[in-house]
Image (cartoon, rainbow, N blue to C red):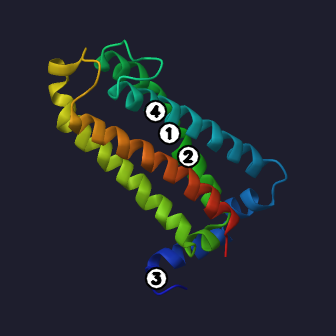
Amino acid sequence: MPEWLPGWMFHFAQWLDQTSFGHVMRESLYLFPVVETLHVFGIVSLVTAAFLLDLRLFGVGPMRGMPVDRVARWILPWVVAGFTVQLVTGILMFSAEATRSAVNSFFWYKMFMILGVGINALIFHFTVYKQVGKWNNARMAPIGARIYGVLSIVMWLGIITLGRWFSFHLT
């Protein structure tokens, strides 16, 4: 067990590995590939929707002529659906290799980046976006919104990258 990993997390992962659910996820010929495919579909839905808003904030992309609040309302169901699929399928995949995942630093980098992208979105919605009425139809959003957009794009690309690295570096 790595020194940086809390003991309770390591023991939880070991327990999850030993459950019948973890065993079925690990041993089934089709279950893990189906869940992993759904995980990919979830990230495509989530990131595509997020990027549409991020690009609109810079006045580029296919929705550049639409009001920002309209784009935000349109993408929200896709973001929620994508995130829900990501959460459920991520937990299922974690259960298949819980101990090996828990000791993998790439897994934790990905989790912290997901936390970061969530915090970034909350900050955006509770600060800059509260004033959207003032810049809703502007070609380019104010600097605070664009900073959010850059951070969002960078973190989502990082999450995807870390997800790939993590899956190929199970210790």
User: Tag 1's secondary structure?
Assistant: helix
Q: Are marks 4 and 3 in contact (CB under 8 Å)?
A: no
Residue flagged by tag 3: what amino acid is it? Answer: Gly
In the figure, 107 relative to 115: above or below?
Answer: below
Q: Is residue 141 above or below residue 123?
A: above
Q: Which residue is mark 1?
A: 84
Residue labelled with disc 2: 88
Residue picked out by circle 4: 51
Do the CB atoms of the residues marked 2 and 4 lie less than 8 Å apart?
no
- Considering only vertical position in the picture, is 43 above or below 68? below
Query: Left or right: where does residue 92 sit relative to residue 81?
Result: right
Side (left or right) of 44 relative to 8 = right
Secondary structure category for the residue under label 3:
helix
At x 66% / y 40%, what residue is drawn?
A: 38
Q: Amino acid at mark 1?
A: Thr
Q: Which residue is mark 3?
A: 7
Q: Nearer the viewer, residue 75 or 51?
A: 51
